[in-house]
Image (cartoon, helix red, strand yellow):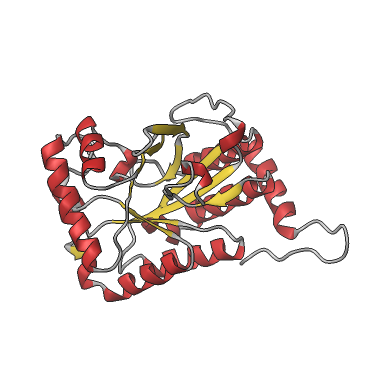
Amino acid sequence: MVPASGHGPGAEPTCARSALVRVQIYACCPRVLHRPETWNRQTASVSGKLLVSVSGIGESTLADVDAFCAEMDARSVPVSLLVAPRMRDDYRLDRDPRTVDWLTGRRAAGDALVLHGYDEAATKRRRGEFAMLRAHEANLRLMAADRVLEHLGLRTRLFAAPGWLVSPGVRTALPANGFRLLADLHGITDLVRLTTVRARVLGIGEGFLAEPWWCRMVVMSAERIARRGGVVRIAVAARHLRKSGPLQAMLDAVDLAMLQGCTPMVYRWRADAAVLDAA
């Protein structure tokens, strides 16, 4: 259910009250961190930002992604949609007109499309598709993926590799193929200005865990980063959105970041604005 606002002057919104209750519940749970990190306060020019992304979008997950995006719409939070031309189980985006139409409509409404690899099925399960590539092979895959998206009317100049990991060769090949922004595990890089905003991804699924304790860590970390005025990057693999735990964790993380005053935005590049000022 989408939280309803309170009524009357001075009434506290229901979503704010429920978010506060949830963070109290999470605070009572053991704080087990999969990979402990020290979150530094960001500079004022990039503080208080919220980026929400979804990967693994296709025919089998579209209904769940659409429902999640409806929740984000109710919160006025745009979503970065991470798209790949091919995925496992012989899925091909160019044979899925319903998803193509949905992506086209979402982008027109303000969401962002981000290239998220080319062919997941051709990659070893525990190794990201672009994590180990040399520049030549990366160039071939980027060209192939770009050609498919251009044919479908979904071309983008933004890139986020599967698993959020990229090799040095990929970093070389991206600008050579016209890409202007790279979102990886540790930050967001403007490939034209050669500047990087340091901000780590908080993810559920696709290279990250999805167990209850990890979901609690994602929620608490998002709230902590937001409270310090940082850049909150939360990501979820679409197949986990049908599970109540990961879905609720994503909603809680968004609500708490918004409660702390974060400005929601998408991955975007503009010639006249820095990376996190482009939305």
Q: Which quadrant of the view contains residue 2?
A: bottom right
Q: Where is residue 239 in the image (x, y as percent from the top left)?
A: 37, 58
Residue 158, compared with residue 168, is above or below; it is below
Q: Which quadrant of the view contains residue 131?
A: top left
Q: Residue at the right extreme?
A: 9
Q: Residue at the front extreme?
A: 272
Residue under the image location 32 percent in, 70 percent down: 99
| Left or right relative to 45: residue 15 | right
Residue under the image location 76 percent in, 58 percent down: 13
| Left or right relative to 101: residue 274 | right
Q: Position of residue 23 (x, y in %)?
A: 66, 43
Comparing 9 with 135, the one in front is 135
Residue under the image location 40 percent in, 41 percent down: 209
Q: Position of residue 109 (x, y in %)?
A: 48, 68
Q: Where is residue 240 in the image (x, y as percent from the top left)?
A: 41, 55
Residue 40, compared with residue 116, is above or below; it is above
Residue 88 visible from this viewpoint: no
- How many numbered callouts? 0
Residue under the image location 44 percent in, 52 percent down: 53
Instruction: Specify the quadrant that holds the N terminus.
Output: bottom right
Residue 268 visible from this viewpoint: yes
Residue 265, compared with residue 231, is above or below; it is below
Q: Which quadrant of the view contains residue 200?
A: top left
